[in-house]
Image: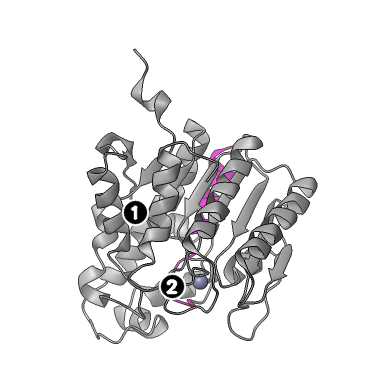
Amino acid sequence: MINFFRRTKAYVVFSSEYLIGVSTYGDHHTFDILKYKRIRDKLIVKKLLKVKNILYPKPCDFSDIKKVHSIPYINKIKDPVYVNQALKIEINTLWDNSVLEYFKAVCGGTVHAALKAIELQKPVFNLGGGFHHAQPDKAEGFCLLNDIAIAIKVIKEKTNINNILIIDLDYHQGNGNALIFKEDPSVFTFSIHADMWLKEKAVSNLDILIESSISDNKYLESIEKNLNIVLEQINPGLIFYVAGSDPYIEDELADMQVSRAAMLKRNMFILGQARKIETPIVILPGGGYGHKSWEIYYDFISTSLKGKYNV
Ligand SMILES: [Zn+2]
């Protein structure tokens, strides 16, 4: 009998703790906080995801968080009032630290996804995360903690992997990671974006700024061409892919015009490249706003679970 797990094409990390913040901040800045639950539920209804395919993480604790974030900043984010102000959350929940708990849960998910991707040698999707704007002593763009940077620090301590690639295709530049790994030659930051995110310019190892009006074909060509350039320079032992859905034409915040079909092509291309070079990959949703945004990440996970690479 073939072992079920050997036939598994991909894994999904999710925990009920990802829903902690729902009652507190609801639909924040058009972000559909239930999008990941919607994705999980539809994958189960469609029989693409069995419960045993779901990996359950533990929340990150402060000993891991402090590998990236400063002690003064950690002390500040223990105060819910500071957190609400930093993330521009209007509901004033003085006594309630559920937003911090949400970020700790999802950060734990990204750490777990990275460890499992290495162990299982399969793509692992986290149903949350990709908080690429968070910096050591600063929250930015609805990112309180930088899950990618925390996971990278843990991986470097727990494994012998020391050559990591971040592919960031969110609409916004991955400025937090660019800043955190600026002096670290073992982490290559590659970002293709239409928006530099605020005025301060962080510099990735490779930044590609594209026009918002770029066509599907030109967008996909740019990704392929530039990823080839990156992979000529480095041979990663692990890839983090920030698969932001905000370049999608239906996104309610961003202004790019990429079709749903091209978003899936983009995502499956990245997965296919990781597979080709036999490198474990952790996939994070990053940004994506509005009521249709969840479909983009759903398409990606469902197609991956079916093992279809040519879409
Ligand atoms: Zn974004």
Residue 66 in view here: yes
Which numbered mark, 2 or 1, is in the foreground of this view? 2
Label of residue 92 in the image: none
Q: How many marks?
A: 2
The front one of 215 and 104 is 215
The front one of 15 and 300 is 300
Residue 19, above or below 251: above
Q: Is residue 190 left or right of residue 263?
A: right
Could you tell me if the residues under marks 2 and 1 are in contact, i.e. CB atoms within 8 Å?
no
Q: CA distance from mark 2 to mark 1?
A: 32 Å
Which residue does the image show at 54% across and 62% down from the upper left? 68
The front one of 191 and 117 is 191
**Disc 2 secondary structure class:** loop
* Mark 1 Cα shell of 10 Å, populated few (<14), some (14-19), many (≥20): many
Q: Looking at the picture, how far across and down is residue 237, in whole percent?
A: 64, 40
Label of residue 59 in the image: 1
Residue 1, above or below 114: above
Q: Which quadrant holds residue 187?
A: bottom right
Q: Is residue 226 left or right of residue 4?
A: right
Type of residue at label 2? Glu
Type of residue at label 1? Pro
Q: Looking at the picture, how far across and down is residue 275, in whole percent?
A: 59, 37
Q: Looking at the picture, how far across and down is residue 85, in whole percent?
A: 37, 85
Indicate which disc, 2 or 1, sits on the residue closer to the N terminus. Answer: 1
Please report the bounds of the magenta region as a residue range.
Answer: 139-160
**Disc 1 secondary structure class:** loop
Q: Quadrant of the N terminus?
A: top left
The front one of 216 and 70 is 216
Q: Looking at the picture, how far across and down is residue 29, in whole percent?
A: 36, 81
Which residue does the image show at 34% across and 41% down from the upper left? 55
User: What residue is disc 2 on?
Assistant: 250
